[in-house]
Image (cartoon, helix red, strand yellow):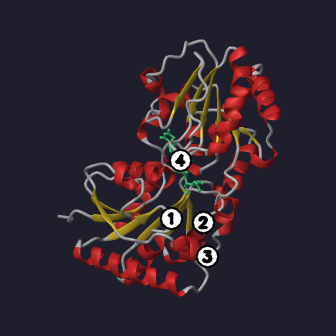
Amino acid sequence: MVDTIRLLIAASGTGGHLFPAIALAEKLPGYQIEWLGVPNRLETQLVPKQYKLNTISVEGFQKGFGISSLLTLGKLVGSVIAVRKLLKQGNFQGVFTTGGYIAGPSVIAARSLGLPVILHESNALPGKVTRFFGPWCDAVAVGFDVAAKYLPKSKVIYTSTPVRSQFLDAEIVSTLDLSIPPEAPLIVVFGGSQGAIAVNKLVRSCSPAWFEAGAYVVHITGDKDEEAGSLQHPQYISLPFYENMAALLRRADLAISRSGAGSLTELAVCETPAILIPYPFAAEDHQTYNANVFTAVNAALLFKQAELTEDILRSEVLRLLKSPDELRKMGENAKTVALTDSAEKLAQLLREVMEK
Ligand SMILES: CC(=O)N[C@H]1[C@@H](OP(=O)(O)OP(=O)(O)OC[C@H]2O[C@@H](n3ccc(=O)[nH]c3=O)[C@H](O)[C@@H]2O)O[C@H](CO)[C@@H](O)[C@@H]1O
């Protein structure tokens, strides 16, 4: 009889790092899974109760990564020791990680114990940690196939990025609990898992013209926007966060969004056309690389935040609202850049590596 396999999932920080790992974990019945994160990030809220969350302190690691700062090195060594101890004491047989600062110590610790590691990188331009540690991993699964060209020394496999299971349910739209008339055009605005204050300002200024055109706006502002709540209108719904993004994106006629890999993959599987405004301060401008994947297949319009004025945003949205055929075509094109069976593909890859 084969013993139950014990897997440590190192995924931490943002929705973009956590949701793909949660979707994968759901596809590994029979595996005993524990989580590795840090004490003060989103994993403390998002990791499902059935997985034990172990935490270590690796804050700030990514920032100084690549520069031989003693502090960074000291933190890294401490984290590696902590993860090694956890892996040994917990009898784990392998590690899965979604990159980011938690991945460095996890990969080093696992490899130093001879354990297999799979890393999933969801961005079109892989992060520094992925580029550096990718060759140490048994495989690097990528969310967009263009990422492979930045990982020449890694064993790269295109799996797309797993989304939460509700995104794959075409009927989910019936669970939308916001009062929006069925025939009204719907614009959904969101800025990743943390909101986007600069986009919020623009959207509030433009919205009255969109209301006049009959559109409803669901605006997810994040919880750090002090001006959230300053716009009131019967066709406007403002929320700090919304759980049922799957229903909302399927219902949306147009999304206005940052271009984090998680949001983009969800837009793709929901076939939602989009206006993308990459977060200008994202590491190495990786959100622009992500957005380029969409513009390359005419699935979205891309605007640099610094160049996007109220006038441009207002008029582009009004133009698109008058062009349902163009919107429909953009949605169809979006579908081509993601796989709906990504979680299964990733689970299969993991099983192949862990059970060989
Ligand atoms: C600012 C930044 O650097 N963000 C990065 C972060 O993702 P970050 O979490 O910021 O953004 P993503 O777009 O990847 O994911 C956002 C997730 O939050 C969910 N959501 C959002 C709002 C809401 O109300 N409800 C909700 O469920 C979305 O559905 C999505 O699943 O890691 C990603 C993966 O490495 C990167 O591509 C992003 O660039």
Sequence-wise first label, 3 or 1: 1
Residue found 54% across the figure and 71% down from its top: 62
Sequence-wise first label, 2 or 3: 2
Q: Is residue 12 found left or right of 209 in the rendered image?
A: left
User: Gap in Å between the C-alphas at discs 2 and 4?
Assistant: 19 Å
Sequence-wise first label, 2 or 1: 1
Residues tagged 2 and 1 counted as in contact (Cβ below 8 A): yes
Q: Tag 3: residue type? A: Lys
- Say which residue label 1 marks: 99
Residues tagged 2 and 4 counted as in contact (Cβ below 8 A): no
Quadrant location of the C terminus? bottom left
Mark closer to the observer (2, 3): 2
Q: Return the residue nearer the eye: 176 or 110.
A: 176
Mark closer to the observer (3, 1): 1
User: Gap in Å between the C-alphas at discs 2 and 1?
Assistant: 7 Å
- Say which residue label 2 marks: 127
- Say which residue label 3 marks: 153
Q: Tell me where residue 324 appears, x and y as whole percent.
A: 72, 21
Q: Is residue 268 above or below residue 74?
A: above
Mark closer to the observer (1, 4): 4
Q: Tell me where residue 5 appears, x and y as whole percent.
A: 26, 64
Residue found 52% across the figure and 46% down from its top: 193
- In the structure shown, which secondary structural element does the residue marked by tag 3 occupy? loop
